[in-house]
Image: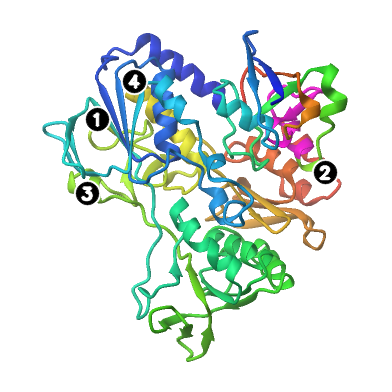
């Protein structure tokens, strides 16, 4: 449905766009999921000027979700991560500059400067710089064997740890931490997860989901410590132990830190663009400079559905936001207000989330967590905010049509006899 | 390598040689067949690689598993022969497979 709306907007852009000439140069900073999508969407909207896309990494745009799962476990070759074959960028005349960073934006001159010493002018610019992991600064944080995970290089570095055996300490029980915990257990490692909060996934999910995943990981042999605060790491060159604030010492061969990500806003800040938990954009993906757009993990946008600004770290958000930004860079006027969604695979369990549950005043549980198939519905004053679906794709698919749209009857929702499909009118 | 034919909604055909072991979705993306978005990259999480399997091939391709079947329920215009192409693995017996693409994904 969202696609259909997007398509109409794209058509409009191609036919009636008049404020942008269709042959200037578009520059895209960041060759991740958002950057790659925006380049394609520019072309789909009829933009036939030059497109130059800068990526700091050696690889062409690729999918990151498998980096903590199939790719980390050695079940997927690197090429299968690539979003498109290299020939695609040639065919679409997208000048992909790999291993080149943009170091500054000059809004007055409408140019960017690269780490390679080049200065290049733009007519339209997209900032799609992503959100690299937050780093720890405690004592021992710079020891060898302390890993972060965001890139192919990061996953490549972590993989030998999984085959070496021993114990890995994972700091943070968010998606990355728990997915790596599952991969490490599958590889036969001993795993200790340290989480400061009193439950896992505290930032993104409700209590029922937390309880389910705590049991899931403990049943798989993970030593899960809640309310556990890390103090520092010990070791000579290699990390040898994690020491908690309580004084307890946990010996380990490696550490994976997954304590969230911070939007990469340095370029935007230096260029004096508006920042609001990420690069500020309006509903068209435009920053405070009308010729500069932003999309993906680095950008925040106004959400009508939630009546506040959101900055989302997810593949679907990167794709949909970049579609809008790309179309609008080509002169369109598309609006981004998609219902967010996410997924996470751990062991044999697939979590699919629709919406953002923060602010919910009522939750309804459907199905049986013990059967590993259930869903949690989050409501606010009777309006559906979000749904977490565990091994329940039907609940996921239905909720994508319901979240943010309608009032929902909590009583009939809670009734196991209610056919979910009857809720979609 | 097995040949797979993808037919766009407009009728335009794309014949590609697909590596054994990858998915029908990946073979399309690798060969730049338009009309398969594959937003989730093959995690069976999004239903944007929906195809209609030519009825002559239904037997060899097989039926979707429960997870995929539920996802298909809410794809755009699902039919009896709908599949998510990320869940079909290319193998020798699928040489000559024909799939049709829906008007749009998701």
- Judging from the image, what secondary structure is the residue with disc 1 in? loop
Q: Is residue B54 above or below residue A392?
A: above
Depicted A178 relative to depicted B73: above or below:
below
**Residue designated by label 3:** A269
Q: Are marks 2 and 3 in contact (CB under 8 Å)?
A: no
| Chain containing the residue with disc 2 | A
Position of the N terminus of chain A, as image quadrant, is: top right
Quadrant in which residue B80 is drawn = top right
Of mark 2 and mark 4, the one earlier in the sequence is: 4
Q: Which mark is residue A5?
A: none
Q: Are marks 2 and 4 in contact (CB under 8 Å)?
A: no
Q: Determine the CA span between mark 2 and mark 4.
A: 46 Å
- The residue at which mark 2 appears reads as A418
Q: Secondary structure at mark 2?
A: loop
Which of labels 2 and 4 is toward the front? Answer: 4
Question: Which badge, 3 or 1, is on the more N-terminal residue?
Answer: 3
Instruction: Specify start and end residues of the magenta stretch as a single range.
Output: B68-88
In space, the residues marked 3 and 1 are separated at their CA atoms by 16 Å
Return the disc, 2 or 3, that comes first in the chain's sequence: 3
The residue positioned farthest toward the front in the image shown: B1
Residue ID for mark 1: A290
A329, A367: nearer the viewer: A329
């Amino acid at each position: 449905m969202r696609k259909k709306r997007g398509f109409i907007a794209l058509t409009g852009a191609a036919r009636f766009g008049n404020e942008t000439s269709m042959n200037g140069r578009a520059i895209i900073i960041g060759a991740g999921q958002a950057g790659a999508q925006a380049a394609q969407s520019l072309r789909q909207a009829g933009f036939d000027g030059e497109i130059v896309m800068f990526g700091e990494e050696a690889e062409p745009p690729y999918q990151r979700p498998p980096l903590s799962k199939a790719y980390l476990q050695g079940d997927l070759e690197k090429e299968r991560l690539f979003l498109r074959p290299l020939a695609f960028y040639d065919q679409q005349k997208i000048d992909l500059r790999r291993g080149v960073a943009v170091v500054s934006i000059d809004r007055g001159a409408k140019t960017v400067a690269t780490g390679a010493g080049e200065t290049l002018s733009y007519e339209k610019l997209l900032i799609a710089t992503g959100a690299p992991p937050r780093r720890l600064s405690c004592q021992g944080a710079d020891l060898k064997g302390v890993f972060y995970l965001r890139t192919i290089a990061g996953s490549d570095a972590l993989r030998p740890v999984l085959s070496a055996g021993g114990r890995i300490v994972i700091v943070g029980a968010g998606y990355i931490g728990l997915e790596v915990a599952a991969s490490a257990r599958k590889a036969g490692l001993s795993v200790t997860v340290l989480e400061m909060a009193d439950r896992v996934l505290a930032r993104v999910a409700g209590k029922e989901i937390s309880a389910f995943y705590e049991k899931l990981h403990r049943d798989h042999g993970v030593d899960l410590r809640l309310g556990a605060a890390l103090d520092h790491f010990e070791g000579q060159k290699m990390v040898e132990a994690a020491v908690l604030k309580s004084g307890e010492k946990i010996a380990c061969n490696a550490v994976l830190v997954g304590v969230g990500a911070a939007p990469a806003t340095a370029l935007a800040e230096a260029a004096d663009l508006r920042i609001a938990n990420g690069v500020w954009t309006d509903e068209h993906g435009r920053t405070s400079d009308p010729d500069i757009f932003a999309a993906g993990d680095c950008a925040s946008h106004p959400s009508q559905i939630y009546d506040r600004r959101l900055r989302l770290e997810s593949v679907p958000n990167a794709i949909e936001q970049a579609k809008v930004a790309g179309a609008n860079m080509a002169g369109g006027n598309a609006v981004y207000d998609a219902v967010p969604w996410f997924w996470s695979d751990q062991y044999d369990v697939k979590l699919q989330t629709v919406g953002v549950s923060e602010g919910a005043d009522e939750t309804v549980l459907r199905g049986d967590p013990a059967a590993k198939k259930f869903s949690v519905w989050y409501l606010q004053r009777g309006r559906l905010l979000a749904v977490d679906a565990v091994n329940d794709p039907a609940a996921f698919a239905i909720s994508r049509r319901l979240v943010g749209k309608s009032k929902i009857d909590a009583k009939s929702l809670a009734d196991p006899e209610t056919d979910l499909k009857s809720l979609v009118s | 390598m097995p040949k797979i034919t993808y037919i766009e909604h407009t009728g335009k055909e794309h014949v590609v040689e697909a590596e054994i072991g990858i998915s029908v979705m990946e073979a399309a993306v690798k060969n730049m067949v338009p009309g398969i978005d594959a937003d989730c990259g093959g995690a069976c999480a999004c239903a944007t690689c929906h195809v209609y399997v030519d009825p002559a091939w239904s037997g060899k391709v097989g039926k979707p598993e429960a997870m995929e079947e539920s996802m298909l329920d809410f794809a755009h215009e699902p039919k009896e022969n709908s599949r998510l192409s990320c869940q079909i693995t290319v193998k020798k017996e699928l040489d000559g497979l024909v799939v049709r693409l829906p008007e749009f994904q998701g």
